[in-house]
Image (spheres, helix red, strand yellow):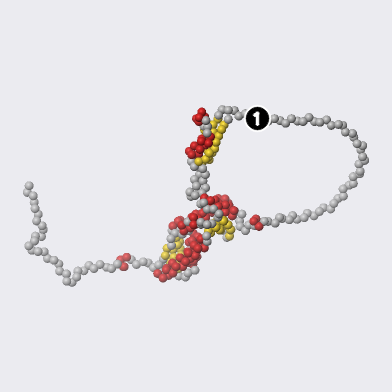
Amino acid sequence: MIKEYIATGKTIEEAIANAKVGLSAPDRFMLDVKTEVLEMPRKKILGLFGGADAKVKAYYDDGVKEKKVKKQKPKKAAPKKEAPKKEAPKKAEPKKEAPKKEAPKKAEPKKEAPKAEGEKRDYPASVDLEFAKAYLSEILKGLNIDGASVNATYSEGVITIDLACEDYGIIIGRRGETLDSIQYLISLAMKKRSNAYVRVSINVGNYREKRNETLKHLAQKNSAYVLRTKRRYTFEPMNPYERRVIHTTVQEIEGVESRSIGSNQDRRVVIEPVGGALKAPKRDDRRPKATTSAPADYTPKADRADLPKFGKIEVNKD
């Protein structure tokens, strides 16, 4: 009879050791124990969520044949002998009347069952809001955030997810970098599921509204600086959403214009005056020139007549 035990572990070696311990084979069968890897370990995404341990099966044959229990077939009961029935006198059968033909009924139109409120969809079938909410919930579990409220809506090609929780600083991260990464992961998962791209925006703790107001204030403040100094101003690298807010705000201010420079993660916004910025003066024009002429009362020093022009040179006569 084959005895087996399945165990898990962070690595294959740990899973094998756990399986052998759980199998607890006798000493005489220790050399006959074999192992089989059922599942390989998977690493966690971003080191926070997902992943799985390795699964290993350990087994050995103890040489004892398994006894097969024969199923007993139920015995058929002998049929009981029935007493012969006396035949009753036959009654005269009444004459059957021909069935009257009924007029064909008009088919009534089928009434459709009223749709439940939850089944109404004002968005494409490729957009699965429940999947987006479930995917975000799994990420929150990996971040050890419990008791979060997740609500998703769709409008104008964007899935907006409203998230309410106690500690949302972990989700936002430094300057919203963690929040942008989560949005990107959900967009990739949605595209893989429906083969159609959809933009995802997560709003947690009214961070988006506060960040928009901050960006608008920065755009107005630095536009005023550009108008006053006639020089350009360059922002720090931003994501596409934040650059769009800067461009939209600058378009409403006369005398300045904005453009994006750089590539990939170093993409940033530049504000400059309409028609171009002033060139910075050259460095030589700003520095004072050095004086090369000698003063009028300067007299060069004369050499003394009693001193030789060159020092005394001693020669060894050895």
On the image, the x and y values in percent for residue 249 come to 49, 66
Q: Quadrant of the N terminus?
A: top right
Q: Is residue 9 above or below residue 156?
A: above
Q: Is residue 5 above or below residue 307?
A: above
On the image, the x and y values in percent for residue 126 come to 59, 53
What is the secondary structure assignment of the residue under circle 1? loop
Residue drawn where x is 51% and y is 43% of the image = 53
Q: Residues within 10 Å of mark 1 (few under 14, many from 20)?
A: few
Q: Is residue 50 above or below residue 253?
A: above
Q: Is residue 201 visible?
A: no
Tell whether 311 sits left or right of 229: left
Give the camera-side residue of 30 and 54.
Answer: 30
Q: Is residue 133 visible?
A: yes
Residue drawn where x is 22% and y is 67% of the image = 292
Residue drawn where x is 27% and y is 68% of the image = 289
Question: How many numbered discs sit on the rendered protein?
Answer: 1
Residue at the bottom extreme of this rendering? 296
Give the camera-side residue of 152 and 233.
Answer: 152
Residue type for callout 1: Val
On the image, the x and y values in percent for residue 189 come to 54, 51
Tell whether 140 sits left or right of 106: left
Tell whether 35 sits left or right of 122: left
On the image, the x and y values in percent for residue 111 come to 73, 56
Residue drawn where x is 49% and y is 68% of the image = 252
The residue wearing badge 1 is 69
Give the camera-side residue of 269 and 142.
Answer: 142
